[in-house]
Image: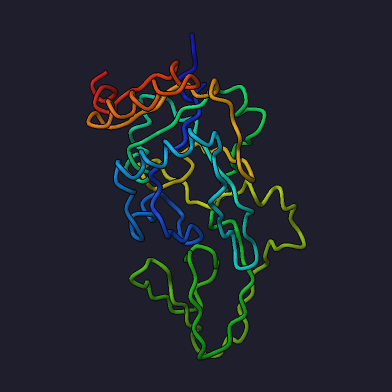
């Protein structure tokens, strides 16, 4: 019997929203506070460009803390097919599926780390404000906290406490390779409240692949014919299955 909590096809979505500050996102719902996924037609154009070049470009970088950022990377997910539709709300309705063989050789799974356990170093003096991403990052009640419209918090020391200090994981104490595969999130069983549900794998730098590595694509029904015509025009992709979200939602 096959385990159903992971997939042997690894999916890359081509409709991720542009101009997102990923360092401010601690859960998928945070993405929608900044931008919406690209329209399916635009995501399909990106899919065709990826297939024509046989290259998945490393276009994403994430800020882990004030001093730490990842290198540019590309990513896939091993979410099982029947749960994959949940991903479309944040990353669009066009997905490219790769066979697991080369993904296992070139990608590594992300390590999800709770934001409240990832402490940062902050120096505060009376009368000065500090803007932070996560209220839970500071384990003290000796300040006033105001939540801002973008979801962050403005902290102000009460009275005359002087210095507020928390230890930090910085560039001198952590391996860069580890940083590239680290994702800060909150953990929750609710849909959209934790990146842990995304089962992300990453590859630093561009990922070059052969046409026979592509197993399937998923598109909205109204784009299926265009997609099939593109696949049939190249000997590299004639074996690729073209699925639709409408079919999967009824399966």
Q: Is residue 40 above or below residue 145?
A: above
Q: Residue at x 28, y 27 (%)?
A: 224
| Residue occupying the far right of the picture | 172
- Quadrant occupied by the C terminus: top left
Q: Is residue 144 above or below residue 7?
A: below
In depth, the one of 3 and 241 nearer the eye is 241
Q: Position of residue 74 (x, y in %)?
A: 56, 43
Q: Position of residue 227 (x, y in %)?
A: 34, 28
Q: Is residue 111 above or below residue 159?
A: above
In depth, the one of 59 and 158 nearer the eye is 59
| Residue occupying the far front of the picture | 233
In depth, the one of 180 and 131 nearer the eye is 180
Q: Position of residue 103 (x, y in %)?
A: 60, 29
Q: Is residue 38 above or below residue 139?
A: above
Q: Residue at x 41, y 55 (%)?
A: 18
Number of marks in picture:
0
- Residue 43 vs residue 172: left or right? left
Q: Residue at x 60, y 38 (%)?
A: 207
Toward which corner of the image does residue 118 lie, by quadrant? bottom right
Q: Residue at x 24, y 28 (%)?
A: 221
In depth, the one of 109 and 151 nearer the eye is 109
Q: Position of residue 117 (x, y in %)?
A: 58, 56
Toward which corner of the image does residue 55 lie, by quadrant? top right
Query: How is this picture coloured?
Result: rainbow
- Residue 9 vs residue 65: left or right? left
């Amino acid at each position: 019997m096959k385990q159903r909590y992971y997939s042997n096809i690894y999916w890359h979505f081509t409709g991720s929203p542009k101009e997102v500050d990923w360092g401010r996102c601690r859960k998928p719902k945070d993405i929608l506070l900044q931008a919406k996924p690209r329209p399916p037609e635009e995501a399909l154009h990106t899919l065709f460009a990826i297939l024509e070049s046989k290259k998945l470009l490393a276009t994403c970088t994430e800020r882990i803390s004030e001093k730490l950022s990842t290198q540019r990377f590309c990513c896939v997910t091993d979410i099982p097919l029947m749960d994959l539709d949940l991903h479309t709300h944040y990353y669009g309705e066009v997905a490219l599926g790769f066979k697991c063989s080369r993904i296992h050789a070139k990608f590594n799974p992300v390590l999800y780390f709770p934001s409240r356990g990832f402490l940062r170093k902050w120096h505060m003096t009376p009368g000065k404000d500090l803007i932070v991403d996560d209220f839970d990052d500071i384990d003290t009640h000796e300040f006033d906290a105001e939540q801002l419209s973008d979801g962050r918090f403005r902290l102000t020391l009460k009275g005359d406490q002087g210095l507020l200090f928390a230890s930090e994981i910085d560039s001198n104490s952590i391996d860069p390779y580890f940083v590239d595969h680290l994702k800060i999130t909150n953990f929750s069983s609710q849909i959209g409240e934790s990146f842990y549900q995304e089962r992300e794998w990453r590859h630093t730098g561009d990922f070059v692949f052969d046409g026979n590595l592509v197993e399937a694509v998923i598109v909205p029904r109204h784009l299926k014919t265009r997609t099939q015509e593109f696949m049939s025009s190249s000997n590299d992709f004639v074996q690729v299955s073209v699925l639709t979200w409408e079919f999967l939602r009824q399966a």
